[in-house]
Image (cartoon, helix red, strand yellow):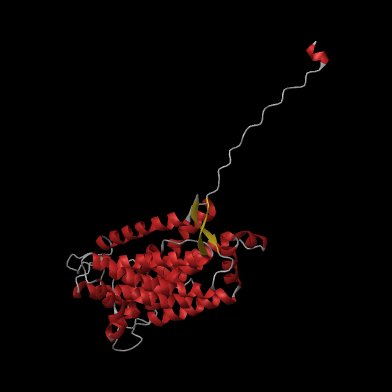
Amino acid sequence: MSTLRFESRREPSRLMLWLTPVLAVALTLIVGAVVFTALGYDGFGAVREIFVSPLFDSYRWQDLLVKAAPLALIAVGLSIGFRANVWNIGAEGQYVLGGLGGTGLALLTLDAEGVWILPAMIVCGILGGMVWAAVPALLRTRLGVSEILSSLMLNYVAIQLLYYLMRGPWKDPMGFNFPQTAMFSASQTLPTAVPGTLIHIGIPIALALAFVAWGLLARTLAGFQVRVVGLSPQAARFAGFREGRVVWMALLFGGGMAGLAGVLEAAGPFGQMVPAFPTGYGYTAIIVAFLGRLHPLGIVAAALVLALTYVGGESAQTSIGLPAAAIGVFQAMMLFFLLGVDILVRYRLTRGARPVAQVAVPLPTPEPIRTREAAL
């Protein structure tokens, strides 16, 4: 009886590997339109509002860049670890800790002024994300605990810490009992890169760091170690590369980038810390990293695509009554089709005979040779 099975391709097409994200996005648009039409919504209108209309609106372009910046920062940090098979799923918590680190310094210097305050907040935010990422790094290198589980669980701890601070020590006494901090001062907020727009300096910072990460991966020994450990841990050990060092480096870099994204969001679009600060960027950045093929420049393009789902999704809720959960549906479909198309590029579906189970037949135990003396 023949069965379907996957057979590894001898040499996957490099062109198809790079076209995989494009095919995944195209399939998401087509299937998403059909699915939401079947659910009773204007499916094709939803696709138009989410993925097309923002591209022809100058104001939405500003919002698009603002939302793409944290996605790109977090995804670039995650891509370093993913290349080394270090699976950091805790970027959401590291993003929150980055925002809390910068906010803590902002509250301490609320009545102060000076150009040093904002850079100090950024440093505190980066350190906050790195400290939170150091926990799964320590657990993996010392105790062998999977960083997937430990980093994921720390996301919920970070959110509960945020809620405690907003309703307790950091609550603004002049905030009419709302669970939020005081508004940041002018010395604690990001200046705009283009006057009169929403584009703050965090956007060029994100683009510059993507180029820096590209150079680190391609031109430094540390980047070479990351690639070797990810491709062949045995070859890395033979070359003298310490896997534990790469784990620490990957997690700290990813945590620092997520923390940087957090503090830039707190000091930029939010201008304070609120319970609604976690927006799912840490989870969406995982899709961004793989949609960009773990390449820093590809991640920048993928961040723009995923930012469209946020910007266009908000307008689609008001224009055609699309539910808020539709954003997550489109993002999930994008990851699903990306993985599916990627498998078909690397493997071919073939039909072959089902292997016949082999049953081991025990051989008869030979009788012992009886000598003449034993017989007597």
Q: Is residue 329 above or below residue 188?
A: above
| Res. 183 visible in picture | no
* Residue lying farthest to the front in this orientation: 1
Question: Residue at point 59% right, 77% down?
Answer: 219
- Name the residue nearer the viewer: 255 or 146: 146
- Name the residue nearer the viewer: 57 or 322: 322
* Residue lying farthest to the top in this orientation: 376
Image quadrant where one finds the C terminus? top right
Q: In this view, does 147 lie above or below 193?
A: above
* Residue lying farthest to the bottom in this orientation: 195
- Name the residue nearer the viewer: 310 or 166: 310
| Res. 84 visible in picture | yes
* Residue lying farthest to the right in this orientation: 373
Q: In this view, does 197 lie above or below 151?
A: below
Q: In this view, does 183 lie to the left or right of 223?
A: left
Question: Residue at point 47% right, 67% down?
Answer: 342
Q: In this view, does 17 lie to the left or right of 270?
A: right
Q: From the top left corner, tell me how far across and down residue 198 is, in percent.
A: 30, 83
Q: Quadrant of residue 340?
A: bottom left
Q: From the top left corner, tell me how far across and down residue 123 is, in percent.
A: 43, 73
Q: In this view, does 201 lie to the left or right of 183?
A: right
Q: From the top left corner, tell me how far across and down residue 98 is, in percent.
A: 38, 68
